[in-house]
Image (tube, rainbow, N blue to C red):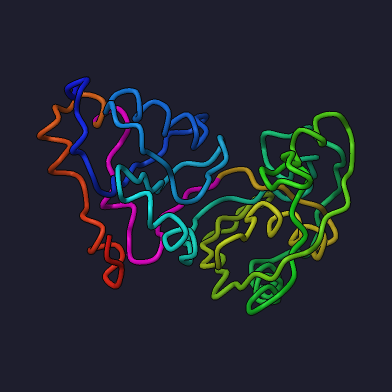
Amino acid sequence: MPNPRNSDLEGILLVDKPKEWTSHDVVAKLRNYLKVKKTGHAGTLDPMATGLLIIMIGKATKVSQYLMSQDKIYTGTVLLGIKTDSQDADGQVIEERPLPEDLEAATIQSTLNTFKGDQYQLPPMFSAKKINGQPLYKQARKGKEVEREPRIINVTSFQLTHYESPSFDFKVHCSKGTYVRTLAHDTGEKLQCGAHLSALRRTAIGSMKIDQAHTLDKILTLSENEIKELLLPVYKAVPSYVL
């Protein structure tokens, strides 16, 4: 474990977030292990999601906004025919519908193509977005619906990678602030059978890829010097930024 008085750890650590951990859980665990007060993440992943989580340590926290503004790439699975209140597998089922008998991969891909480009997306109630200082999910858990403003997002590509009824796999390249589970939900609405996101993995943020990341289990076994070797200097992630 790093020295309790350690203060010179600085840089960007790429973590492969495990399922059922919140992004805050990962930050708290690493802050405690690394003994560094300035620690944060650049882009929340829901507990059911896995994949690339950028952890900023020390002065690297100053580039948080830049890193959060980068495009993201995700892979995942959508389960058709079942809607949930959270739009993903962690929610409660609120409706079930039959799939169209003639539903084919080509129809699904055609539907996914309709999401490409700039568009307005309504943030889901089960989200960390704050309105009047309170996360929406706290209101949602009380069964309340809060008025919220749609926001502009951009989907560069939305590709079907496998279809075996009643679910399909996908890969999506999208802008910051995009709720992939809302894309899944809206796809189900367009197909008139309902749907929810059943699996999600983030594979890239800007130029940083999941194959550069390290599992939390591995990181928590490393010495201070070994962790230093894993840290990316800020200039590699943000070439134009000077600390």
Give 189 or 243, whichever is nearer the viewer: 243
Residue visible at 41% across and 46% down? 53
Q: Residue at x 65, y 55 (%)?
A: 179
Residue 99: x, y in percent?
Answer: 80, 54
Give the quadrant of residue 66: bottom left
Query: Which segment is the magenta one?
Result: 200-218
Q: Nearer the viewer, residue 63 or 75?
A: 63
16 or 113, which is in the foreground?
A: 16
| In magenta segment, residue 204 | yes
Q: Residue furthest bottom?
A: 117
Residue 27, image x, y percentages: 42, 34
Residue at image position (29%, 24%) is 33
On screen, residue 124 versus residue 56, left or right, reads right
As for residue 126 lying within the magenta part, the answer is: no
Q: Residue furthest left?
A: 225
Asked if residue 82 lies left or right of residue 62, the reply is right
The location of residue 200, given as percent across then percent down, is 54, 47
Residue that appears at 14% across and 30% down: 224
